[in-house]
Structures are given as structure tokens and as C-alpha cells.
Amino acid sequence: MWKNRVLYMIIVFAALISYIMADRKEPLIFLCVLIIIPFTMIIIQFCAMRSVSIKCEAKETCRMGSSIPVIFTLKKNNRIPLGIIYVSVVFENLMFVEKKIVELNLQPGEEKLMTFEYSLPADDCGALKISISNINYYDMLGLFKWKGTIMAEKEVRVYPPELHLNTELSRRPETKSFGELYDQYKKGQDVSEVADLRDYIDGDSMSAIHWKLSGKLDKMIVREFGSPSNYNTLLLYDMMKKSGDILISNSRNNGVLALTAALSYSMMEMGLEHNVGRIYMRELQTVPVNSFGTHEQMAENLLYTPILEEEDGSNSVFVFLRGNYRNEYTKIIYITPNYDEESLKQMASGADLMVIHVVEGRDLEYMDRNGYTIIPVNVDTYQNRIHNIVL
């Protein structure tokens, strides 16, 4: 803008010198026109800006590794010419707590409705918030600038790359037939908790009949029993930006999410109900997965929990052990980009432990420790090489 102003002033000064030296009306007319033009531009720009609206649109979901086309729609209510518009677009990953600001140049034409597209690579998983933080209007000569305000916001969920796993169990984890917590949306076989009553239909078990109530109502009433929701299998995943002095890359955390989602889906294909959890804010936060619908809810939940700067892998396991959570589960599958062996030994002392270690840049060997097993997975090759896993 300052360059344009300096250039314009040089032209005005040259016109003034030309008029003084020539003492003719043509240079005077040209000088007057140069003086009037900026004021005319201001009036035109104000009229044009009052009719402008900008929308930001993008698809709601995509997979990591693809591109996100972000469409900006500019609408004018009149055909008054408008100068260049510079828009600052903020792409904020809510999970990695990272921001990227892109300056876009929207140069509108005479049309009332125009679209501009920007393609953003989806390099990381997470909920991606797209918003316009700043908008600057310039007149057609670039002499003046006006700051505008606009409410344009969109959110895109970037899921991990699709990974199909064939999972086998070395032994099926123990499950509870009775429990203290019950799923109000799911019927089961736990006779200690009655979830509902209904009329008898052919094929119902005679042991489920409520004989006392049936006698009072003079019709057969059947009890529907509850289903415990405190499952015994935990899929524990860990995400971190550092572990001690070791910096953990986004790629390894992305790999943790991909393996967590894929493994949970594979376990549901086997009919194995489980919990998916993570230590966050020094507490174990879990989501029960007992159907493909709850798996979808869990996968979406993965994208919104941020990775805090102070999170450390060894601290997460320490919180898990101190909270005595291991006594609630008979099998723990721990997916992590880094681990501490002493902590794993303590975790394995009270449960059947399997560790999936996400590494980068090198291949490690499968390790069978005393009381637990470590399966290394390389983030550079796991999408093409990891198809079968034995837990």
C-alpha cells in the first residue's frame, strides 16, 4: 500500500511541476483529476463493501493424507467495482493445539457471486477448525485499506488413515456376567438387575416370568434383565509431545490414533466389547465400545481430546498405576509412542498386558518380556505392512 501511495504522490508531483512549467490548462486538468480520484475511490469502495458477504465452506470429514478443498464464496448485492480483498484464514488443529495462518488474495470481478478455492493438505488427524480471523479491503488503486469483520467458520474432522486389521486372540479376555454399572440402552442376562417388564411372547424363558405380577394382572409378564457396562478389556492409548527429553512427532501420534481406531473396530467384529481410554488431565477417561455405533462415537471422540504440552508418557502410566485402574481390567492393550519398562512391569503384574509401540525411522523386533509382550509398529510402513495382529 505504501509503495502505491509513494508512486501516486510522485505522479501528482510530476503533474504539478508540469503545470507550473507549461502554464497550460491540460496539466491543470490532469492534476485536478489526480486529486479527485482518491476521494472517488473512497466513495466507491464504501458503497461496494457494504454489499459484500463471504462464506467459508468445506466438507465435514476426510481421511488423513488427502486434501481439504476450502471454498470461499463472495457475494455482492450490486455491481459496483471492488478492489482486492486480503483474507487471513486460520487452520487450528484442536487435538495437536497447532495453528496455521494462510493469507489469501481474493480479487473479485464484476459478477455478484464468485467462488475461490484453497486446497489444504490434511497432514494430521484431529478436529480442524477453519475460521477467518482478519479481512482487509483495498481500493482498486491500492491507496487505502479498510479492516472488516466477518463471521465465517467451519469445522472438519480429519480421521486417521483407514486400516483393516485381522485380529486374533491368544486367549479371550474374561468378561463379567454380573456388575455394578448397567447399560440402560442394552438388555442382557444379568438376573441381578431387572431393566424392563413386558408381556410374554412365545419362546421366552420360563425363568424370566414374573409370577407374582403375572398373578395380579392375570396375564404373563416377563422380566428383561440388565447388561453390565463395566467391561474388562481396556484399549489404552497414549499421546504426547515429549517423553522425558525425547520429542514425539505428530506422525507417531497419528499412528497411535490409526491403530487404536482400527483395533477397536476389529475387536467389535469379533464381538468383543471393550473400553477405549486415555490418561488426560491426570485422570483415566474411557469410552465404552459395545457396538459399531458406539465405535463411531469413540472414533470421533479421539479427534477432540487435545495433546497437552506437559503430558509425558511415563507420567501417564504412573497415574494409571496410582489410580489402581489395572484391577478393573483383565486385559490391557496399551498403544503408545514411548514407554518406560519399569512402569510396564508394574502394569503387567495385575492384568494381561499387550503393548503396541509406535516407532519412526527404524524397525524393532517383537519382544516377549516376562509378563507382557511388545509389538513394534513403524509409522512409515504400517499402512502397507500391518494386516494381522495377535493379542
Image (spheres, grey):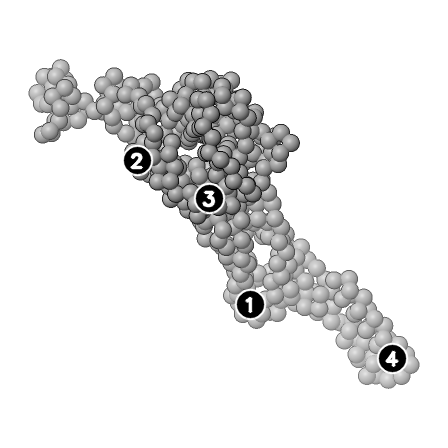
- Dot 2 alpha-carbon crowd within 10 angstroms: few under 14, some 14 to 19, many 20 or more: few
Q: CA distance from mark 3 to mark 4?
A: 74 Å
Q: Identify the disc placed on residue 78.
A: 1
Position in image of residue 203 (x %, y %): 11, 29
Q: Residue at x 62, y 50 (%)?
A: 101
In the depicted structure, whether residue 386 falls above or below residue 239: below
Q: What residue does disc 2 label?
A: 270
Which of the two discs, 3 and 4, sits closer to the camera? 3
Q: Are marks 3 and 4 in contact (CB under 8 Å)?
A: no
Residue type at mark 2? Answer: Met
Residue type at mark 3? Answer: Tyr
Q: CA distance from mark 3 to mark 2?
A: 22 Å
Q: Identify the disc placed on residue 18.
A: 4
SS of the residue under disc 3:
helix
SS of the residue under disc 2:
loop
Which of the two discs, 1 and 3, sits closer to the camera? 3
Which of the two discs, 2 and 4, sits closer to the camera? 2
Sequence order check, earlier mark of 1 and 3: 1
Q: Identify the disc placed on residue 382.
A: 3
